[in-house]
Amino acid sequence: MPGHSGSDGDTDRVEVGVELLAALEFESLSVADAVDRIEAVTTNPRTTRAILDAAEQRGLIERDAGRVYPQGGGHVDFDADVIRKDGAFSCRRCGCSLSTGHFIQFDAGEVGPFGSSCIRIVTGRE
């Protein structure tokens, strides 16, 4: 991608992370909680920072006093955007073993697997 340093994998993770932040159903959350959600995409601090910066530059979130405010750009439609797959998985959020993984489908890529309760926590449904 012109003007972007890093591998295509980093670019993809930034785009998926931005889409994840845009889909959060929170009025606000702490930066630490936002980073917890981003860790479903990456644990690299540089990529995490790039995700937060890109989402803010695009007007998808606002940051103030250690809080992140999603700007209501979207949500995850559990019927259309979440794919269930059977197999042997570990939840990206809590690490539990799963026989059915729930994956969120974004335009930029897939995030998951999550357990049935963790996917709701990640997206802000619980």
Image (cartoon, grey):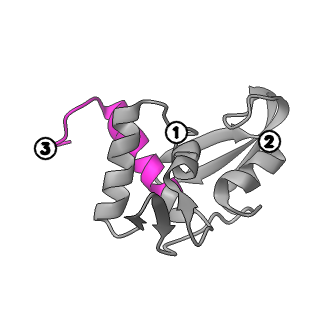
Question: Distance from label 1 to label 2 (Cα)?
Answer: 15 Å
Q: Quadrant of the N terminus?
A: top left
- In the rendered view, would you say 26 is above or below 54? below
Mark closest to the chain's N terminus, 1 or 3: 3
- Marks 1 & 2, CB-CB < 8 Å contact: no
The majority secondary structure of the magenta stretch comes to helix
Q: Give the position of the C terminus as an image quadrant.
A: bottom right
**Which residue is label 3 attached to?**
3
Instruction: Give the amino acid at mark 1.
Output: Val
Give the distance between the C-alpha atoms of the residues marked 2 and 3, in whole angstroms: 37 Å
Q: Residue 13 lies in what quarter of the image?
A: top left
Q: Amino acid at mark 3?
A: Gly
Q: Nearer the viewer, residue 37 or 87?
A: 37
Q: Which mark is residue 41?
A: 1
Position of 90 compared to 46: left or right? right
Label 2 belongs to which residue? Answer: 115
- Residue 124 vs 42, above or below: the answer is below
The residue sitting at the front extreme is 65
**Quick check: can you spot residue 108?**
no
Question: Label 1, label 3: how many angstroms apart (C-alpha)?
Answer: 22 Å
Q: Residues within 10 Å of mark 3 (few under 14, many from 20)?
A: few
At a point 71% along the width and 49% down the height, the residue shown is 83
Range drawn in magenta: 1-20
